């Protein structure tokens, strides 16, 4: 703890603080632009760290990671386009709040949840970095498989009135995930002779198409895009009751995100979906989720903003980068001539604790910067829908093009925009398809890896206590929408009989 406090003093040094501020601002910008994820934003700054003092370069890279996870929620709430994969769950309630004129409240709760969740994660990191790294090593292919399946169990919670159509949408997403070259056999699957599909579908074109472009098409065909906005700009903030209601959710989701972040290969996207699912299962009056419930913003934002600190656990304690972003941070350590791993805490313990302290200060900086940009951001909602939807289409196609530097990505945005529009029109759930697509690779690769190790025995999937815990949570997630629908129907019947 003493080393952490010393690190806090150094983090508040004007020079270090300036680099943290630069990292936060650039991270928010990178996260807010669809196609520029946390890892891309960090990689763009990485060349500038050559020859830089690690006291400045490492905190700056870590701050970019922190800022980008929050930045992804901004377009998710305002224009239904998640800036990062982790913000996809925020779209469900965040955009609905914005549509009701509560965009400022959603952005404010996203900032509050992200900052508090991040602080919780850093505190957990300081006290549990060694034990949690050992726990993360207990996760093998079967545990990752069931964790991904548990993430898929949220499908019923994001499917609206028809869980069955939600599961069909998720299967469609799983199908999209297997397009491309098989990573085990190098066989091309469902590419239909199109060479561009050999490497699989990129996440950003799929998400931008299914979320943003489909919404623009829906508004155009319904005539909503031509509605005149009569409501003047009005900034709204969460009430004390809403803060009190969401704080326990934020603390729990922040702790959960720390654990998920410590698992190599899991990441912020899975953490946000699990947090959303578990919050909906455990809270009361959850029928408002998906229609603009502020709790549906708090849970995923707390979870995905706690992942950066959680991701430092395997990196610092074991020398294992668990994601693209932590791999880039590890490159920053290498450039500085520092080796990550157990001996880091023996030979130079002040370095990891200084970095933890800088990440804690980065959360405070994020809160200040976020509050400064809230009002300018919410003013975007006062722009005429014709101009706003036009800008959304421009950002969607340009952002997708930036991912691959190839016009093919823009065509994919159009294709999935049309697919998402048709799904909405016939009652299917684009968010469920996105969830299936995001988790598909994790499900397939770990299932096949487990079967290879067990020589085809399916008993391996039920061989550890962690497996059974995850199975129980999965079953609960699948049954939850049907149980709540049954209870709601029963209550409605009693109310009708009473009248």
Image (cartoon, rainbow, N blue to C red):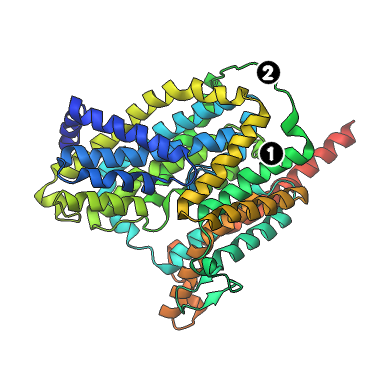
Residue 206's tag is: none
**Nearer to the camera, 352 or 77:** 77
The mark nearer the N terminus, 1 or 2, is 2
On-image quarter of the C terminus: top right
Q: Pointer 1: residues within 10 angstroms few (<14), some, or many (20+)?
A: some
**Nearer to the camera, 437 or 261:** 437
Residue 287's tag is: 1
Asked which secondary structure carries label 1, the reply is: helix
Asked which secondary structure carries label 2, the reply is: loop
| Image mark count | 2
Q: Position of residue 466 (x, y in %)?
A: 44, 62
Vertically, is 287 above or below 263? above
The nearer-to-camera label among 1 and 2 is: 2
Residue 377 shown left or right of residue 60 in the figure: right
Q: Residue at x 45, y 42 (%)?
A: 303
On-image quarter of the N terminus: top left
**Nearer to the camera, 102 or 299:** 102
Residue 231's tag is: 2
Q: Position of residue 241 (x, y in %)?
A: 55, 22
């Amino acid at each position: 703890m003493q080393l952490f406090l010393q690190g806090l003093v150094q983090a508040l040094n004007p020079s270090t603080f300036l680099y943290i501020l630069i990292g936060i601002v650039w991270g928010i910008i990178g996260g807010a632009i669809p196609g520029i994820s946390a890892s891309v934003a960090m990689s763009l700054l990485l060349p500038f760290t050559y020859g830089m003092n690690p006291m400045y370069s490492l905190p700056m890279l870590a701050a970019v990671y922190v800022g980008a996870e929050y930045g992804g929620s901004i377009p998710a709430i305002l224009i239904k386009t998640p800036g990062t994969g982790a913000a996809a769950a925020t779209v469900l309630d965040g955009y609905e709040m914005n549509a009701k004129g509560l965009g400022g409240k959603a952005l404010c709760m996203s900032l509050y949840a992200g900052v508090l969740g991040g602080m919780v994660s850093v505190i957990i990191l300081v006290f549990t970095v060694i034990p949690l790294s050992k726990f993360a090593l207990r996760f093998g292919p079967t545990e990752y498989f069931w964790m991904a399946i548990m993430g898929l169990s949220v499908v019923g919670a994001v499917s609206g009135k028809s869980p069955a159509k939600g599961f069909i949408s998720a299967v469609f997403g799983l199908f999209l995930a297997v397009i491309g070259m098989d990573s085990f056999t190098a066989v091309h699957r469902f590419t239909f002779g199109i060479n561009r599909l050999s490497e699989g579908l990129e996440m950003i074109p799929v998400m931008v198409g299914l979320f943003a472009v489909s919404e623009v098409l829906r508004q155009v065909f319904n005539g909503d895009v031509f509605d005149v906005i009569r409501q003047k700009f009005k900034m709204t903030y969460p009430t004390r009751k809403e803060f009190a209601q969401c704080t326990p959710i934020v603390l729990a989701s922040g702790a959960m995100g720390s654990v998920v972040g410590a698992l190599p290969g899991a990441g912020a996207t899975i953490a946000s979906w699990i947090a959303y699912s578990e919050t909906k299962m455990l809270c009361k009056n959850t029928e408002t989720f998906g229609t603009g419930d502020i709790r549906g913003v708090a849970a995923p934002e707390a979870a995905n903003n706690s992942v950066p600190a959680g991701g430092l656990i395997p990196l610092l304690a074991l020398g294992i980068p668990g994601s693209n972003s932590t791999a880039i941070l590890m490159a920053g350590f290498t450039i500085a001539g520092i080796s990550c791993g157990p001996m880091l805490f023996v030979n130079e313990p002040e370095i990891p604790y200084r970095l933890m302290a800088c990440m804690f200060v980065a959360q405070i900086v994020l809160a200040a910067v976020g509050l400064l940009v809230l009002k300018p951001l919410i003013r975007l909602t006062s722009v005429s829908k014709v101009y706003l939807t036009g800008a959304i289409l421009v950002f969607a196609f340009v952002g997708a093009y930036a991912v691959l530097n190839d016009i093919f990505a823009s065509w994919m945005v159009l294709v999935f925009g049309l697919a998402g529009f048709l799904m909405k029109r016939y009652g299917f759930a684009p968010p469920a398809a996105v969830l299936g697509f995001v988790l598909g690779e994790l499900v397939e690769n770990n299932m096949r890896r487990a079967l290879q190790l067990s020589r085809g025995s399916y008993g391996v999937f039920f061989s550890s206590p962690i497996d059974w815990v995850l199975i129980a949570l999965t079953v609960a997630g699948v049954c939850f929408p049907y149980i709540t629908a049954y209870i709601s129907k029963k209550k409605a019947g009693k109310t009708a009989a009473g009248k």
